[in-house]
Amino acid sequence: MTETAPLAALTPADLATLAGIELGDARKLVSSYHRTGGLPRIAPAGVRRVALERARAVTHTPALTVESRAASALDPFVKYAFAAPDGARFEAVRIPLERAGRYSVCVSSQVGCALACTFCATGRMGLARNLEPWEIVEQIRAVRAELPAPGRVHGVVFQGMGEPLANLAAVVQAARVLSEPSALAIDGRAVTVCTSGLPTGIRALARELPAARLGWSVGSALEQTRASLMPIERAHPLREVLAAMGEHAALTRQSPMWAYTMLAGVNDGDDHALALARLAHAFADTYGRRPRVSLVAYNSIGPGDPYDRSSPERESRFRDVLSAEGVAAIRRYSGGSDVAAACGQLAAG
Ligand code: SF4
């Protein structure tokens, strides 16, 4: 039996090549799939019957099951738990954007994660497997299908379960489909890929998806503290990550976003703020782009939680120290903490 490809993972150009059909036909069939979740029974207007038959012969349409939806009572976030046909479970979060009717979807790229950051619930699970491109695309389709009218998915952020740069080929293919006008039509510049800091992946991302934005989880600007929070620091120390981010910035002409999860008594002291400011200046001086720094409040990751959230006073003092050093930082609102949908909390059981 010849292997067929999941249609959700194909751009029109991929489908045209695979099925040996014209690009115009492929576009209409891909568009039909993204509207309905399947291929039409009879060829729609303007599509040759033979093109539909060929497309059907080389593709299949696997589906994710939505196992649960948890809507936050605190804010309009919704956490989705999905099951793949093999039983693998993972999560995505619908995030309302400031402009009414616009949403972003925070998607998973792996089932679990091998990188074991100590402040992250997913990091406690270990890695079960990579997600396939279609499994990434389908998370967004499933969230989109339930948006209140006239809502639309404006952006996608790879910050759910998993390290996206450890599954780069699937992330790149999914992002290509997402930004296809006949598929999900999400602007490539509204796709953000967040990493714990894998230098080879950062460089490859710049080449493969130059429009996508790069986010980096800092952990700490002090190497020792970073190593205690993020084991990856031992394999790829700060200076290596910065060099890769610098190359990314030069190639894409974009500033990276630095996300700093604040942990009480661990990385929220004045010395940490000064180190972060120095690192941001060093990056800007060396690579000509100022990183956009955002401070993320810590959310509990469950039993045996080793950390506490920084107090509002500490957080504000941290920002003041940054600001006195000439570094503006925004506070990223991470919602849905009552349904464990907030940053660092995703861990499908
Ligand atoms: S923060 Fe990201 S890279 Fe670190 S363990 Fe969690 S999912 Fe993996």
Image (cartoon, grey):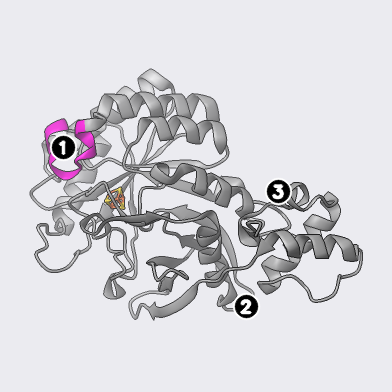
x and y, in percent, of residue 194 in the image: 40, 46
Q: Earlier in the sequence, mark 2 or mark 3?
A: 3
- What amino acid is labelled 1 in the image? Ala
Q: Which tag is nearer the camera, tag 2 or tag 3?
A: 3
| Disc 1 + disc 2, Cβ < 8 Å | no
Please state which of residues 206 and 32 is positioned toward the viewer in this rendering: 32
Span colored in magenta = 223-234
Please give left or right for residue 180 compared with residue 136 in the image.
right
Q: Residues within 10 Å of mark 2 (few under 14, many from 20)?
A: few
Q: Is residue 230 magenta?
A: yes
| Disc 2 + disc 3, Cβ < 8 Å | no
Q: CA distance from mark 2 to mark 3?
A: 31 Å
- Disc 3 Cβ-to-ligand 1 distance below 8 Å: no
Q: Which tag is nearer the camera, tag 1 or tag 2?
A: 1
Q: Is residue 219 above or below residue 340?
A: above
Q: Residues within 10 Å of mark 1 (few under 14, many from 20)?
A: some
Residue that appears at 81% across and 50% down: 20
Q: Which residue is mark 1?
A: 227
Q: Which residue is mark 3?
A: 14
Please give left or right for residue 168 compared with residue 179 in the image.
left
Q: Which tag is nearer the camera, tag 3 or tag 1?
A: 3
x and y, in percent, of residue 332 in the image: 34, 54
Please state which of residues 207 and 53 is positioned toward the viewer in this rendering: 53
Please state which of residues 292 and 192 is positioned toward the viewer in this rendering: 192
Residue that appears at 70% across and 70% down: 35
Q: Earlier in the sequence, mark 1 or mark 2?
A: 2
- In the rendered image, which quarter contains the N terminus? bottom right
Q: Is residue 80 above or below residue 57?
A: below
